[in-house]
Image: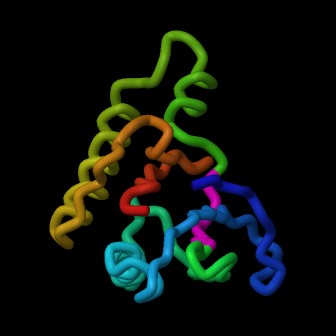
């Protein structure tokens, strides 16, 4: 799906990331796999893990009887790992920072795995880096 940056006017104007996903619906409605994945994301959110991107809300709009548009509202993080690394001046990322980032990444993965979630798409674009250097895993599941 596509991701957009938006403002959440009901929560102090904070920035959020809107991920729009089109879901093919059949006679029984939304596929069970989609419902399960949203349920897992909602369950994980209850733990507010510092290394997993926050899910604030889920909205659905039926476009047709065969398609539903699902919008997931996540916390917004300004940059992914690729952007972060591109901005680092020579001589590169300090060793201690690399160790800290790897520890955070592994802590996030361990949390997901302990809840029987496999990321399935781990790449620099799905590893977000906050302005304070906090690592957040994103874009697993849907």
Name above or below for residue 73 compared with residue 20. below
- Residue 49 pos. (x, y %): 37, 70
Magenta stretch containing residue 48, yes or no?
no
Q: Residue 108, percent across and down?
A: 30, 57
Quadrant of residue 87 in the image?
A: top right
Residue at left offset 67%, top offset 81%: 61
Q: In the rendered view, would you say 85 is above or below 119?
A: above
User: Camera-side residue: 23 or 78?
Assistant: 23
Residue 26 seen in the current view: yes
Residue at the (58%, 73%) spot, across then down = 67
Span colored in magenta: 69-77
Total numbered labels placed on residues in the image = 0
Residue 45 visible, this angle? no
Magenta span dominant secondary structure: strand
Vertical position of residue 79 compared to residue 57: above or below: above
In the image shown, does 59 or 93 lie closer to the viewer?
A: 59
Give the x, y percent position of residue 91: 50, 11
């Amino acid at each position: 799906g596509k991701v957009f940056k938006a403002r959440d006017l009901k929560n102090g104007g904070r920035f959020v990331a809107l991920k729009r996903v089109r879901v093919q619906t059949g006679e029984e409605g939304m596929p069970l796999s989609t419902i399960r994945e949203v349920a897992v994301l909602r369950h994980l959110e209850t733990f507010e893990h510092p290394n997993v991107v926050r899910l604030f809300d889920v909205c659905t709009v039926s476009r047709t009887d065969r398609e539903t548009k699902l919008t997931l509202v996540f916390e917004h993080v300004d940059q992914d790992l690729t952007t972060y690394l591109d901005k680092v001046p020579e001589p590169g990322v300090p060793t201690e920072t690399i160790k800290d980032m790897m520890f955070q990444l592994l802590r996030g993965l361990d949390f997901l795995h302990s809840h029987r979630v496999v990321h399935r798409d781990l790449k620099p674009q799905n590893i977000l880096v906050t302005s304070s250097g906090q690592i957040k895993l994103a874009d697993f599941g849907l």
